[in-house]
Image (cartoon, grey):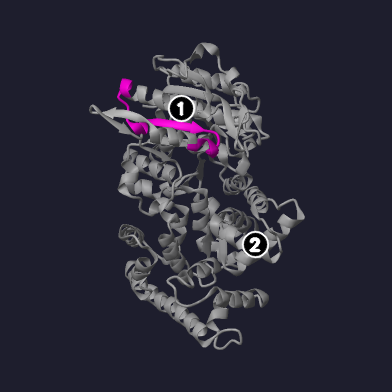
Amino acid sequence: MLNSQQQSAVNATDGRVLVLAGAGSGKTKVIVHRIAHLIQNVGAPPESILGLTFTNKAAAEMRLRIGKLLTPAAAKKVVLSTFHSFCMRILRKEIHNLGYTRDFSLYDERDTRRLLKQIAHEEELSSIESVFTKIAYAKSRGDLPDDKTSLTLFERLHSSMRAFNAVDFDSLLSLTVELFENHPEILARYQEQFRYVMIDEYQDTNPVQYKIAKLLCEKHNNLCVVGDDDQSIYGWRGAEIKNILSFESAHVVKLEQNYRSLPTILKAANALIAHNSERHKKELYTHAPDAEPIALFHAPSENDEANAVVQRLLHLKRTYNLRWRDFAILYRSNAIARTFEMALLQAMWQKQGEWRRGIPYQVFGGTEFSERSEIKDLMAYLRLIANPHDEEALLRIINIPRRGISDKTLGVLTEENRKGNVPLWKVLKNLKTHAQLSSRAIKAVENFIYVIEEAKSHFQQKSLKGAVEYLLELIDYQKAIEEEVQSEKMRIFKWDNVQSCVAALDLYEQETTDPSLQDFLANTLLDQSKLPKKEKDLVDDRVNVMTFHSAKGLEFEATFLVALEDHIIPHEKSFHLEEERRLLYVAITRAKKHLTMSMARQRKRYGKDESSSPSRFLFEIPQDLIKVVSWRNPF
């Protein structure tokens, strides 16, 4: 059943529609019902509907729920994807119009950073961090960097990536805009196809994403955006809150009924966010009965605070029979985490009458499957086979497994590559003799060329799974792991990871109509969930420890907001007070039933104990919603 506000949003199908969806108000339900309504009652063909999201998980959940409302076959025809995946899909078909070839490589942030570091070294710059940040921010906004050094490196980075037939994540968006603006006949095709466009989390869109939506909707003007300006917390990476604040619409719907949190929590969130001036006015409410007030304590030190949080956590677990994974400890800055990790590791608790030490926990953002060295090696091989101009991939695996290509040999070859502006692959292929290289080094390079070309021929003739198994055998990668790693347990672990990657490729091949190595690589980078995760990672019962930013979109029975001090939240380096307030609002609205807020009077900064003051935001929450408890006995 939909409430009246939700039903109003579903029924508004024509023209420009703004749905202001407060935290926990059932926005995904509205989006899927609206798409089903368009297909079932308005008669829109499923393939004429485009739904753009910010995560693959959100797109997959929407497709699943549409399938339950209609049929899986109808849901499959709706184009639901992230902005980046949508642009990748277009560029795979159309990028030749911009001077690239369709087998282009997709560089992630690490690849781009390595390439920029190499360029900076040639320009005799010692550090790239500030430059990288400026370039990334400018690209997210469709601008050029505003200082000479950053602009020079930006231009060199662009020309290098073009030479490597590679694009990065930001370029997927900007190149799509360039394609649409310079080739109106291509834009017209996509405008005709997508008569209804919906955008989720619209408050997180940047100027380039806004432009893509604007161009696509110019013909039919059926654009529905769903979002919450009060949850706009990504300004630092280019998100533009004015996109949702100044969205011109014929129909505005406010989803204010919350299905997540108890009234006390919502009243605190409403009171806090009301102090922002740049917002659409709305107030969350719930029909759930009221319960306990928000607990707050002020500990003498950060260690006392962490221990008190753990004691209250254990008390709530015993009292309400909660699981570890029902708890979250949230903080503004990653630097806060370590103290709480130590307190969790040292905590004593009882299970079936026996005392145990250490509460199981997970810090959000551990080493991802795709970040493990053996997976990065294999993916680099596949990238180079798909695109010989991918120099990042080439440089990673030219001597993996070890084949006698020394750093000196590589230095000579890359110098020739840069000075002559010749692709490195071409330098390697044309290498017959060289005054600075031994015959042994030249032979090693020839062996490497043979491996890549031999593997490439198998990818053209065999199944993807069969070809990658041949590649692993050709380079004897299992032996390379055995030689690299001493521990038998770690050897098995690494080889299992490689086999999991092969299985992922096999699954992709079975599920895809027209599978190709290039498509697999691009989609794997865009959606890391396509790579397998260990089953236990999904079901482990652990306390969640993460930043306010990481918690967005999640919910927990019991939430602890810690280190609520004035130099931390609002953060001393932030110039956007209203965004900092929105960040705390997001953190508060993660809690379903139990919310605890805490701070310390003293905290270590740069190795020294310094006094801390409570966050100014705490004084914006009505006192009658808060129960102050002792840090010694925080129950």
Q: Label 2: how many residues lie within 10 Å, few (<14), some (14-19) or many (20+)?
A: many
Is residue 44 at least partly visible in the picture?
Answer: no
Q: CA distance from mark 1 to mark 2?
A: 43 Å
Q: Which mark is residue 560?
A: 1
Quarter-of-image position of residue 492: bottom left
Viewed as shown, does residue 610 lie left or right of 286? right
Instruction: Give the residue number, with chain letter if any, for mark 2.
Output: 157
Residue toward you, 469 or 365: 365
- Residue placed at 44% from the left, 73% from the top? 402
Element assignment for label 1: strand
Q: Amino acid at mark 1?
A: Phe
Name the outermost residue toward the top: 624
Quarter-of-image position of residue 609: top right
Q: Position of residue 528 (x, y in %)?
A: 43, 52
Query: Can residue 322 be found in the magenta stretch?
Result: yes
For the magenta stretch, what is the residue range?
Answer: 318-338
- Residue placed at 47% from the left, 37% from the top? 546
Is residue 59 at least partly visible in the picture?
Answer: yes
Residue toward you, 144 or 47: 144
- Residue placed at 44% from the left, 46% from the top? 366
Q: Position of residue 388 (x, y in %)?
A: 51, 73
Quarter that holds the C terminus = top left
Above or below: residue 287 compared with residue 357: above
Viewed as shown, does residue 200 lie left or right of 614? left
Above or below: residue 9 compared with residue 363: above
Tell me which label, 1 or 2, sits earlier in the chain: 2
Element assignment for label 2: helix
Q: Amino acid at mark 2?
A: Leu
Above or below: residue 37 compared with residue 445: above
